[in-house]
């Protein structure tokens, strides 16, 4: 006999049940994946490819970096002698892709290294608990809410890049999941606290993106893990759509105001 959440189960019954169960599910309704590290590896690979691409194109001074980075209002890049180098298109100027593409752009090897290490530790845990589709939605919508807060609270002529908004969203989500399952949250809170201190004292760091991502991730996790079992999937996906739409509307309104 094998211990189960309620009483015991016989191994043969479990084996037979596995044959008749079409798809295994995570505790919150997602499809259980065979390799919960795969999505994180793909995300890291995309970030690395984009970083190498921008590096080959001139780094932070290159046209590709300017094309992908989040810039609320179009601006002019000046050379050290004060002469105009080129105009940089921002979201208000029609670069609507930047709130998403900026999630994959990084300024330095230290920037991408720190973010990718954090993603490696957080991603597989959350994908294992949420399933691949919900994990990806959490990642991208958290990044989008981070971009929305950047649009409203950051300087309009300042570029913002990095996966930090999405990663702070994963931190917020992991905290919510830990509270839901009554796990020890001290280590998570300690890690979040260190990142908050680093954000505030670290200099040229987008606290706006971190704050927006964290709040977005926490709200998304609340929606996913506390959704009632009855009609759980429709409630989760409709809620995610509402959050994503709210972020997009906020970005559009700010871009229109800046334009």
Image (cartoon, grey):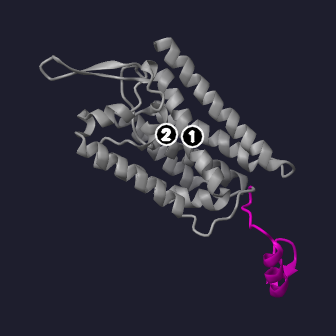
Q: Is residue 6 left or right of residue 93?
A: right
Q: Residues within 10 Å of mark 1 (few under 14, many from 20)?
A: many
Q: Residue 161 at what x, y percent from top left?
A: 39, 36
- The answer, for residue 110, to whether it is visible in the render is no
**Which residue is pictured at 66% across the width and 59% down the height?**
129
Q: Is residue 195 visible?
A: yes
Is residue 107 found left or right of 12 in the rendered image?
Answer: left
Q: Give left or right: position of 184 versus 9.
A: left
Q: Residue at x 50, y 46 (%)?
A: 167
Residue 196: which disc? Answer: none
- Above or below, comparing residue 7 to residue 156 in the picture: below
Which callout, 2 or 1, points at the residue further toward the start of the chain? 1
Nearest the viewer among 205 and 197 is 205
How far apart marks 2 and 1 lie (CA) works out to 7 Å
Count of marks overlaid on the render: 2
Q: Is residue 56 above or below residue 159?
A: below
Image x and y of residue 248, in percent: 59, 28
Whether 217 is drawn above or below 178: the answer is: above
For residue 222, which quarter of the picture? top right
Whether 123 is drawn above or below 209: the answer is below
Q: Which residues are magenta?
A: 1-28
Residue under numbered circle 2: 165
**In the rendered image, which residue does mark 1 sit on?**
142
Q: Position of residue 165 (x, y in %)?
A: 49, 39
Image check: 237 left or right of 190?
A: right
The answer to which image quadrant residue 105 occupies is: top left
Circles 2 and 1 in contact, beta carbons < 8 Å: yes
Q: Under tag 2, what secondary structure?
A: helix
What kind of element bears circle 1? helix
């Amino acid at each position: 006999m094998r211990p189960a959440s309620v009483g015991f189960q016989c191994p043969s019954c479990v084996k037979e049940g596995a044959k008749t169960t079409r798809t295994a599910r995570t505790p919150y309704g997602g499809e259980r994946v065979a390799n919960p590290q795969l999505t994180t590896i793909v995300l890291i690979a995309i970030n690395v490819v984009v970083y190498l691409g921008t590096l080959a194109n001139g780094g932070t001074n290159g046209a590709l970096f300017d094309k992908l980075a989040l810039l609320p209002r179009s601006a002019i890049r000046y050379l050290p002698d004060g002469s105009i180098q080129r105009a940089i298109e921002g979201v208000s100027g029609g670069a609507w892709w930047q709130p998403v593409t900026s999630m994959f752009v990084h300024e330095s090897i230290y920037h991408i290294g720190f973010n990718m290490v954090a993603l490696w530790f957080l991603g597989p845990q959350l994908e294992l608990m949420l399933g691949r589709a919900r994990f990806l939605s959490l990642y991208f919508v958290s990044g989008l809410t981070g971009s929305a807060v950047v649009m409203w609270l950051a300087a309009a002529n300042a570029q913002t890049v990095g996966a930090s908004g999405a990663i702070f969203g994963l931190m917020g989500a992991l905290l919510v999941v830990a509270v839901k399952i009554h796990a020890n949250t001290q280590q998570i809170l300690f890690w979040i606290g260190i990142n908050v201190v680093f954000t505030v004292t670290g200099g040229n760091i987008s606290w706006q993106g971190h704050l927006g991502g964290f709040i977005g991730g926490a709200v998304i996790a609340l929606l996913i893990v506390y959704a009632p079992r009855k009609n759980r999937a429709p409630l989760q996906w409709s809620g995610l759509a509402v959050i994503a739409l709210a972020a997009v509307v906020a970005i559009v309104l700010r871009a229109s105001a800046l334009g």
